[in-house]
Image: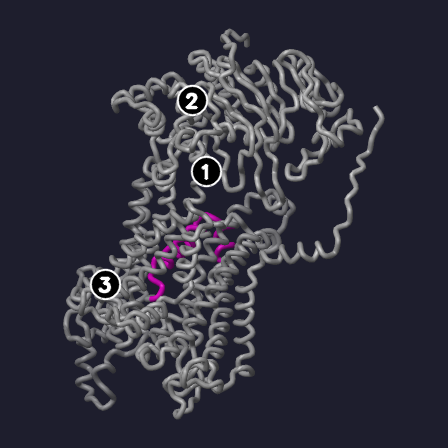
Amino acid sequence: MAEVTARITVAPVPARIRVARRAWQMRRLPLIPMFTLAMFVVTGIAAPWIAPHNPERGDIRARNVPPAWLDGGSTKYLLGTDHLGRDLLSRVIFGARISLVVVAVTLGVGMVIGVSAGLVSGWYGRWVDELVMRLVDIKLAIPTILLALVLVLSLGQSFLVIVAVLAIAVWPRFARNVRGEVLLLKTMDYVSLAKVAGASTPRILFVHIFPGVINTLIVLATLEVGIVILLESTLSFLGAGVPPPTPAWGSMVADGRDRLAVAWWISTMPGLAIMLVVLSMNLFGDWLRDKLDPRLRQLE
Amino acid sequence: MTNRIRIADQPVLEVKDLRTYFRTRWGTVKAVDGVSFDLRRGETLGIVGESGCGKSVTVLSLMRLVPSPPGRIVSGEIILDGQDLLHLTEEQMSKVRGSEIALIIQDPMTSLNPVFSIGNQVMEAVKIHQDIPKKSVFQVALDVLRKVNIPAAEIRMRDYPHQMSGGMRQRVVGAISISCQPSVLIADEPTTSLDVTIQAQYLKLLRELQRESNLGLIFITHDFGIVAKMCDRVAVMYAGRIVEQGSVRDIFNHPSHPYTEALLASVPKLNEDVERLYSIEGQPPALHDLPPGCPFAPRCPYVMQQCYEEYPPVVQLNEAHSAACWRLA
Amino acid sequence: MQRYLLRRLLLALVTLWAVSLIIFVMSRAAGDPRHVFLDDYSKQADWDRLTVTLGLDKPYYQQYGIFMISVLKGEFGRSIKEQRPSMEVIIERLPATLQLGLAAFAFSVVLGVPLGILSAVKRGSVLDTVGKIVALIGQSAPVFWLGIMMMFLFAVRLDWLPPYGRQEAVSIILPAVTLGWFFAAANMRLLRSAMLNVLDSEFIKLARAKGVSNRAVIWKHSLRNALIPAMTFAGVTLGGLVTGSVVVETVFAWPGLGQLAIQALFGNDYPLMQAVIIVFTMMYVASALLVDVLYAYMDPRIRYA
């Protein structure tokens, strides 16, 4: 039988179609959440430069001015002013800064603690594992808000204490998650190979195991951001957050509570900001999880 | 195994030109693309092929269990006992399922509902299709469990699936399937997940069940050893179509389609001493992007120009044996 | 199953102990409660007398011992502010919180469960979209803000419901919905994903192959399985309702335990504060335990392990 080579030629794809196909693939990116998050980060970082007014000093003559699109509003105060004449937009912008910093530091610390605990717990097993996991269970069994309030009110209302409290609230989930991954990865052949080859434990943990953990870690971190923001704003709302006059979204909402009939925007704007950031983070986290680790698909 | 089961003359199941397509974001997947066969009572038809060739979708189509947003049976006829199943409403079809045509699926570990006792699950099958008093339902369930050789059936009725071994669970699934005396029983790779020793027992059980109820058995498998043991006729599937069909003897002794030849050649034989096991070169084609000609062409050792251009006609080699290949035309 | 439950019980007890330790330590670190009554101009004798009354003259471990004993006896000292036994104050306020918690729980189940199931069964429909939006809002909006917004809309603008307090029967609506929304959202998502998972499983395929009607497949075969992971979340729900009441009661001035906790905490009312927190933790832990029991009962794989 004569050999016949396949003569199926493939025509080059025209450029227009290539661009269109790419755009269609891009639509799978969660653009709005990403944009919102970018805005959040940029606003937080650049707050002192982009805020139109001083967030802490108000003009008493301009109390309770409505937002610009309502009667009585002006473009001078785009989102209106509060009961002390402070520009709401500037306060929201600076509130973003506080939230950003708190979240970043909290997650940083919480993740370091949680990941280390998880790595150690999963790797060494036995009583170390038991101990760490019991700590996790206990911590998760304690009502977080109450614990946070007690700690803040007894140790003082400072930035340090708040971050410490939030980090305590956050580390258990990381620890548990990482431990689970480590248990799985421990059994992988390449880990056994590394052990046999004589690699030291820290080396195995960081070079071989940790990279396998990163995916789920990133996804968990994005979801925890929302939790931290909500927790922090709840604490400020209750009066146990970053002390005044530093603008924090939660305390701003509290300020506006008794003035709803007169100036509803005082509560609405900062709360809206919180919701948008948390929402974006959750949506982004969901998308990231779908991309990185479909195994985690629990709350779809 | 000699076949002492009497095979009927007229077919109980006739499948004509069945086509089931799936709409996916990569295009239309033609999972089943013109499949035709029939089955008689007492007869065992084996359907073989690689993963992805469309065997399981054929089974789902016969039961009309194709997941409907992406998939659809676009054309064809499925005539069971004179009735075209594709013309039934969903309500009517659910009455047919389980009572006239039944299914045993592959994985015993996941095929039973973990929160209901097995007695409950068997009795449910009976209750749905038979209008008999409650006490009788229990008895019928008990009888059918005994029939599949579950020891101490009365006690095991109260057990939950996780308390049973894989082999026993698969027998329970078998019991459920025959509980209403179907005319056709489809077994989709029922022994693939079982231990080899249990496999033989299970196959024997299926044979007995078939003999007792004189039902038509469709056996999906990729294992030619099982085919040789169990089947009267065989249909070989590739890329959504049946490429060769015939009696077991015809297929084993006179394989006519190059794919069948290749499949048989890749079964390792214990008495042969070879340096390298034969395997078919290439990959099965992507089902959403099928070429106009024979889908096996890129891997076929006898390929000709015509094979790329047009799908080969079905050539009848003898009364029961047919294959779709240009070489035979 | 017994072993499983025993372990959960043990965990609950250890947790309670840990919490008591924490609040004991924290309350000692918080500040001097004597300042609530006396100032720098008071006489030394008064100071000393108060020290003895409050038991602050004894070494720490003794104070802790006394504390633990009284906790176990159910006595939590006298509230400094109200000059009454703490337990009395707590028992007075408890019904309001229980009422709110129950109403919120009911709301979260009644809204969340059916919405979750239907949104799984009718994927991509209008109902699914509505459900998703409800869920997103519920899980992203801070509870206190949600409450205030609802208060603004329904009480201030529309004047349909009272803005706060517990005077009228309908007063419970806004707080209950606010408190329950988050969990309704979570329940919805959970049930939706659990149902989708189950509907995809092999035993459902077999059930259909048996001839089980579509309705029975959903409501009998799938739901029973989907509820199992949902139940594990119910524990979190109940617990969350307990702690959520702290915020919601503050927003709506609902006279319950949550509001009491805040008042005690900010008012440095040691004994009352300790009492409230322990009671809260007990409720929190007890609800988790209750759900563990239910879960063990519902999943035959654990019941007959």
Q: Residue at x 43, y 71 (%)?
A: A272
Q: How is the image coloured?
A: one colour
Tell me if residue C20 comes above or below residue A94 in the rendering: above
Viewer-closest of A1 and A280: A1
The amino acid on which the numbered mark 3 sits, given as a three-letter code, is: Thr
Circle 1 marks a residue in which chain?
A: C
Question: According to the image, label 2 marks what residue?
Answer: B100
Question: Considering the numbered disc 3 on the image, is that residue within a helix, a strand or a loop?
Answer: helix
Looking at the rendered structure, which numbered label has been put on residue C201? 1
Q: Nearer the viewer, mark 3 or mark 1?
A: 1
Mark 3 neighbour density, 10 Å: few (under 14) some (14–19) many (20 or more): many
Question: According to the image, label 3 marks what residue?
Answer: C97
The magenta segment: A116-145
The amino acid on which the numbered mark 2 sits, given as a three-letter code, is: Glu
The percent position of residue B67, horizontal first and vertical second, equals 50, 38
Viewer-closest of B34 and B143: B34
The percent position of residue B196, horizontal first and vertical second, equals 53, 22
Question: Considering the numbered disc 2 on the image, is that residue within a helix, a strand or a loop?
Answer: loop
